[in-house]
Each structure stands twice: as C-alpha cells, then as structure tokens.
Amino acid sequence: MVNRLVTAGTSILLAICLLASACSDADGPALGDRSLGVITVRPGDAVQIRSLSSFDIPGAGARDYIDAVELAIEDYGPIHGGFAVELGDGINDLCTADDGPLAAQAVLADARTVGVIGSSCSVTAIAAAPLITAAGLVMISMSNTSPQLTSDLAGTPSQHYLPGYYRTAHNDLYQGEAVAAFLHDTLGPQNVAVVHEGDAYTEGLAQAFRSSFEGHGGTITHYIEIDSDTTDLVEVLTPIAADEPDALFFPLYQDTGADLIEVLRQHGGFEDTVLVFADGVLHYSFMELEFSAGVYISGPDLDFRDNANQATGMNAEEAVKRFADMTGAPPVRAFWAHAYDATTLLLDAVTAASRVERGKLVIDRAGVRQYLDQVAGYQGIIGEINCDAFGDCGSGKISVIQHLDPENPDATWDNVVYQFSP
C-alpha cells in the first residue's frame, strides 16, 4: 500500500512538473528578463560571438586582436561545460564611418550572434553600434578610446553613447589629461601646437588634451585639422614653426603620423621641439621609421605585472607564450590584452545570462547587458575592471614612452618615462 501511494504521488508530481514546464535539466537561475529576446543554442551547435577590428594595417600583428579573442575563447572553454563558443571569420572594420554599417551587417548576418568584441576604431563604432545594439547585442571594444562613445566621466552621457556598448580601453579624457600633465608639469613645455585628423578618435583626444593643458595653465598656439589626403604638410608645419612652440602633440593614425614625422624632420624650426604622438602610432610600422627616433608616444599602460585573468587564470606572460604557440609570433598591437579580457567578460556575461533547458542553452540578451552593467572588481590581465553606467570599464591608466631606436622598437615598450592613473 505504501509503495503504491509513493508511486502514485510521484506520478502526480511528475505530471504537474511536465504541465508547468518546471522539470528540466536547467542548471539554475539566469540573469535577464527576456526584454531583448533570447538565443537558443541546440545541442551540438555553438554559441556565436564575433570579432570586429581593422586588420589591413601594414607590418606585423595585423590580426593580433582577432587572435587574442580566439586565444581567450580557447582558454575559457565551453559555456556551462557543454556548449562551445565559435568566433567565425574576423570582420574588418576598415576604420571608416562609411564602412561601419557594413561591418554591423556582417556581425548581424547570423541571428544567433550574442555579442561582438570590437571595433578597433572609434569612428567605426559610432556608425556600427546603433545597428548592433538596436538588435539586442552587446559590443565590447578593446581599443575604442573616443569620449564621444561613453561619457564625460562626470555623469553626462556623450552624444554617441548607447546602452549595450562597453569597452576595456581607456577613455581619452584620461589620455588627454596624462599628456597635458606630462608636458606642462613634468617636462616643462608651456606652449603646444596640436594637429589632428578631425574624426572621433583624433579630434576627441585633441580636444581632451587642449582642455586639460589649458587647465594646467598652458597655451595652445595652433589647433589644426588635416586629413589623410592632405599632401602639402609643409604648408601645415610652416606657420607652426614660425611661432616656435615648445612642443607638438599629434594624435594621428599611423599613415598620417608617418608622413608628418618625415616631413617635419626635413623642415627647419623643430630641432629643439618636443614631439608627442598618441596610441594611434603604437605599431612597428611607425616605430621602425628612421624619422621616429626620439618622439614620445602616449597610450595604454602595458605594465601588466603578474595580473591574471580571473576567468582563465592566465597572466600576461603565459598568454603571450600561448599566443606565440598559436600564431607563430607574440602579439605586438597595444590593446591585445584588452581584447583578451573583453572576450572573457563577454563569455562570463553569456554564462551568467544563460541556462540549460531540456538540453538546449537559452541565452537572455538582456541578462548579458545586466551582467556587464554590474561588473566591479573583475580581475583581468590589464588589471582591475569596473564598468561604469556608460560602458567605460578600463582602468584609465596611461603611460608615456620615449622611442629611442627604430632598429630596436621592442626596447621602446619598456622605456616608460611617465605614468598616469586616474
């Protein structure tokens, strides 16, 4: 009688569970309220993420950011123990506003895609993010630095801020302040000329520097916009030389920076002028130029010490070795570790926002954003990661290096002459 009662009771409970859809192999609660929809991954299929970066640049390391994402995926392993993560082909962001929508369409071509690591260029993000975030996905950039994408760091969203956008890179308001303090308070120049290219990255950094430098009591003698098609750089430099500024600040891209430094070295009037470039030229194709000797370059703090990524346990030394084993050479692009950490952040967010239901992985898109919105004290290779209300997750630490020997650019990375921390 007892056995029959137990059996009958069990059958009734089972029936109730099935009717209520409560009995499954779900592995616990997941973040999210399904307001942005869900992605269902069937057994045998993979979680889809994408990498968006410029990789048609000259010299070594063009695909470093894509490879760093791939390495992080391998180190992280499957989601909930059984669902692999698939990157697909890397998508070239081409570093132009016109190509931003095309890059976004490539990301969105697979409706199963949950997020993208990128873009590498701020100008592309401004054009691509509206499409990507409107579809419910998240973007986590490793190297977008324009203040226009997040906030003024004082609680006011910037003109291009969108929910669903995040970055592990610094906000260039920090880099502008770092260069201003280095020049005015440490090195000594009181009068500086600035040349930029008029886009979200270069002009955003130029504006940040101008505001900070004037706040330190310095004077901006010239504030000039050029573009990549400018051919008469002598005409640009001649009026600057006539006013004899103490220093020049060039937040420029690699190609423009290379052209400008060559013309400047052949132009009279700058022999004793301090020359500072920004992280747009932190690449071997610029640093191997004969004319680049002696310039200062600002950019992200790359002193990773023994920082380890909390999701994979990898520190910088271990990750570089694994990277070299995987690709045949160590990473050389400045934000490779930022790409690695951005990837594990996204995968942790997917893990927190998903559960296994009847053998399928169900990912709540709103839950992915919820996780990223709450990131605090996350340990990455780049250091501690904390995401503010507008997607700024990077530390804001900036270093200035002096480039001495174009024949030995590797030595420059360690030749840090100034460090800034917010």
Image (tube, grey):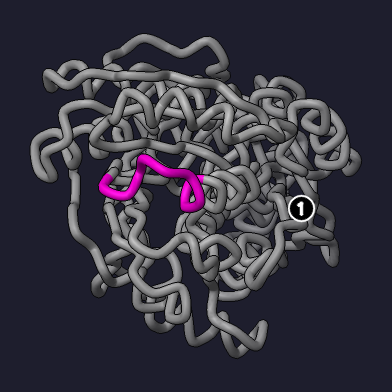
Q: Is residue 325 above or below residue 339?
A: below
**Quadrant where the N terminus is found in the figure:** bottom right
Q: Is residue 399 above or below residue 405?
A: above
* Nearer-the-camera pick, 306 or 222: 222
Mark 1, residues whose alpha carbon is within 10 Å: few (<14), some, or many (≥20)? some
Q: Residue at x 29, y 41 (%)?
A: 396
Specify whether residue 5 is painted magenta. no
Question: Tag count in the figure?
Answer: 1
Amino acid, disc 1: Gln
Q: Position of residue 205 (x, y in %)?
A: 42, 29
In the displayed structure, does residue 328 sit left or right of residue 146?
right
- Whether residue 239 appears in this view of the structure is yes
Residue 329 picture quarter:
bottom right
Q: Residue at x 67, y 42 (%)?
A: 115
Q: Residue at x 38, y 66 (%)?
A: 309
Query: Start and end of the magenta stretch?
Result: 264-272
Q: Position of residue 337 (x, y in %)?
A: 46, 62
Q: Which residue is mark 1?
A: 48
Q: Residue at x 54, y 80 (%)?
A: 330
* Nearer-the-camera pick, 75 or 36: 75
- Whether residue 340 appears in this view of the structure is no
Q: Position of residue 418 (x, y in %)?
A: 18, 53
Specify whether residue 268 is painted magenta. yes
Q: Position of residue 163 (x, y in %)?
A: 55, 21
**Quadrant where the C terminus is found in the figure:** top left
The chief SS type of the magenta part is: loop
Secondary structure of the residue carrying numbered label 1: strand
* Nearer-the-camera pick, 199 or 309: 199
* Nearer-the-camera pick, 246 or 30: 246
